[in-house]
């Protein structure tokens, strides 16, 4: 049995290495320098990665936009 197969067997169903890789997309994004510094500082304060801060911000933005669109549609 390969190392990957052993690891997949130990992980909960649907959480194998291949499954996790397929659910994520890598993107390259440019930020104005001052915004980048602010995001880095937030990450340091929260003791999380810069990527986590950006994903969290993106998720909140999408939720906000979805809510706004729902409210606009109901008018």
Image (cartoon, helix red, strand yellow):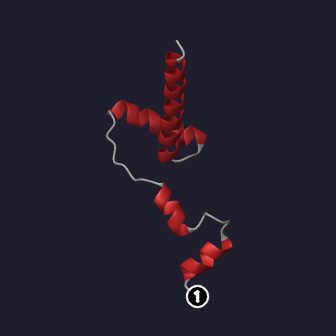
User: Relative to residue 35, is residue 17 depicted above or below?
Assistant: below
Residue placed furthest toward the top: 75
Nearest the viewer among 17 and 41 is 17
Nearest the viewer among 29 and 74 is 74
Q: Residue at x 49, y 32 (%)?
A: 62
Q: Residue at x 48, y 44 (%)?
A: 50
Task: Specify the quadrant of the image occupied by residue 45.
Answer: top right
User: Relative to residue 29, is residue 38 depicted above or below?
Assistant: above
Horizontal and vertical percent for residue 34? 37, 31
Horizontal and vertical percent for residue 56? 53, 39
Task: Specify the quadrant of the image occupied by residue 36.
Answer: top left
Horizontal and vertical percent for residue 32? 32, 33
Q: Say which residue label 1 marks.
A: 1
The N terminus sits in image quarter = bottom right
Secondary structure state at the residue bearing disc 1: loop
- Image side of residue 44 versus residue 29, left or right: right
Q: Residue at x 47, y 46 (%)?
A: 51
Residue placed furthest toward the bottom: 1
Horizontal and vertical percent for residue 12? 68, 65
Mark 1, residues whose alpha carbon is within 10 Å: few (<14), some, or many (≥20)?
A: few
């Amino acid at each position: 049995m390969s190392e990957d197969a052993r690891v997949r067997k130990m992980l909960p169903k649907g959480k194998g290495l291949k499954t996790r890789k397929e659910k994520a997309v890598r993107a390259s994004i440019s930020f104005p320098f001052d915004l980048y510094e602010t995001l880095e500082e937030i990450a340091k304060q929260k003791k999380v990665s810069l990527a986590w801060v950006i994903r969290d911000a993106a998720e909140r933005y999408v939720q906000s936009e979805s809510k706004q669109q729902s409210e606009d549609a109901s008018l």
